[in-house]
Amino acid sequence: MPEKSRRIFFKNLILGALSVPVVSISSQKNDIRDKMVKKGQMHYRRLGRTGLFISEVSLGGSPVPEWPILAQAVERGVNYIDTSHTYQNGNSERLIGRLMKEYGRDKIHVGTKFHVRKKWSEESILETVDGSLRRLQTDYIDVLHIHGAGTEEILTDERVLSAYDKAKRAGKCRFTGISCHGNHHQVVTKAIECGHYDVIQLGYNVFDIQKSEKDIETHEDYLGASGIRHLLSLAKRHDVGIIAMKVLKVGGKRQDLGRYKTEGQSIFQMMIKWALENPNIASVNTEMLTYEQLEEDLAVVGQELSSEQSTALYHHVVKNAKDYCHMCGTCQSKCPSGVRTTEILRYLAYYENYMKQQRAIDSYARLEPKEQAASCQDCGMCEEVCPYGLEVRKRIHLAHAVLTSI
């Protein structure tokens, strides 16, 4: 994005934040109430056509917290946990299995995942499912996801659909889903429209207010700018459940975020409330690894975002948007050298923002040498096509430096 356009965008973003409060309109509030039930201090929303009611704040299992915190989350009303057979070498599923044994299978809905990478087959999917069931100590998985679905073709691959069909007929999974880390405009649209998937776990956070070219006038148009509004509306029309992930995104390297604290709440709490304002979001999936994080995240269940807090969020986006990748996949699809730019930027986010340094290093190492940043020919195509003006080359070379330095 030209610097002049960026300055205009930032100016309008701040002015818009000051003049247009981002509080839910009445119809949105009614929509949320229609799909929500309250039990104790927890609010539960309907997960699309699955009919499951899951907690507004759910638990991410990468990594899963230690036992006392995990148990406390369930006692506080968290009833959906996301995991994968790869998380903590299967130990995430094992601990969740213990949890379901002790608290009752009916108290917890679990979503886990299988991969479709390298040498995979229908048989390998079913073997993965059986392994997950053993570790989870259960007869069935509530939502079985394709882990990180990156292409449209994989969604309708006969091997995948046959594996799902066999798992369902055997009673091993109730509902189908995908998690999507990139190329979401194509992948999520296909997943919704093909009719095979009940649940989608999608990256969704306050940086989706970012706009690339035209001035911004309303809150809804912010989402329209990033294309997320269309995806969420499409999911609603097809009654596909949406779980928001990567909600607590800070953009760029971790910094002192205390300056954004507003009305006694942290920016992370405001980010959760912002996401839950959308009635098409069933739950915000977060990792709560300490008692402090547990208290922080669960404290805002059922709360609304104030106009002052909206303004604080926008100031944060304005300051940090230049380092935030939306994972749209445009740069990667246009790279003439085949560098996996979107994936590399995701690994850098793991390293910088999510304190998952080893996971980032291992993931980057799994890329073929020709897919790594060292193969970049410095042609600038990635930055030319990036809708958000990200300095892609600078960021992927930084990723290469930090992810290969150990």
Image (cartoon, rainbow, N blue to C red):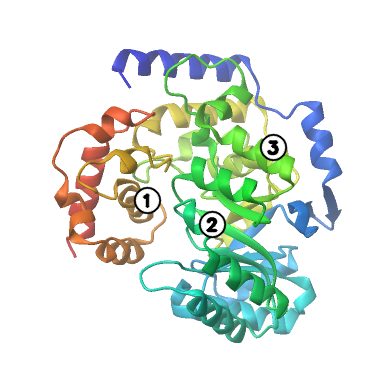
69 left or right, relative to 246: right
Residue drawn at the location 46% of the way across and 34% of the way down: 259
25 left or right, relative to 132: right
Residue located farthest toward the front when viewing the structure as drawn: 158
Vertical placement of residue 16 versus 73, above or below: above
In the picture, the quarter occupied by the N terminus is top left
Q: Nearer the viewer, residue 367 or 402?
A: 367
Q: Which residue does the numbered mark 2 point to in the structure image?
A: 155
Q: Determine whether label 3 and label 1 are within 8 Å by CB.
A: no
- Position in image of residue 46 (x %, y %): 78, 52
- Which quadrant holds residue 11? top left
Circle 3 packing at 10 Å, graded few (<14), some (14-19), many (20+), is many
Badge number at residue 346: 1
- Circle 1: residue type: Arg
Q: Which residue does the numbered mark 3 point to in the structure image?
A: 277
Vertical placement of residue 363 versus 306, above or below: below
Residue drawn at the location 42% of the way across and 55% of the way down: 354
Along the polypeptide, which appears first: circle 3 or circle 1? Answer: 3
Along the polypeptide, which appears first: circle 3 or circle 2? Answer: 2
Distance CA(mark 3)–CA(mark 1): 26 Å
Distance CA(mark 2)–CA(mark 1): 22 Å
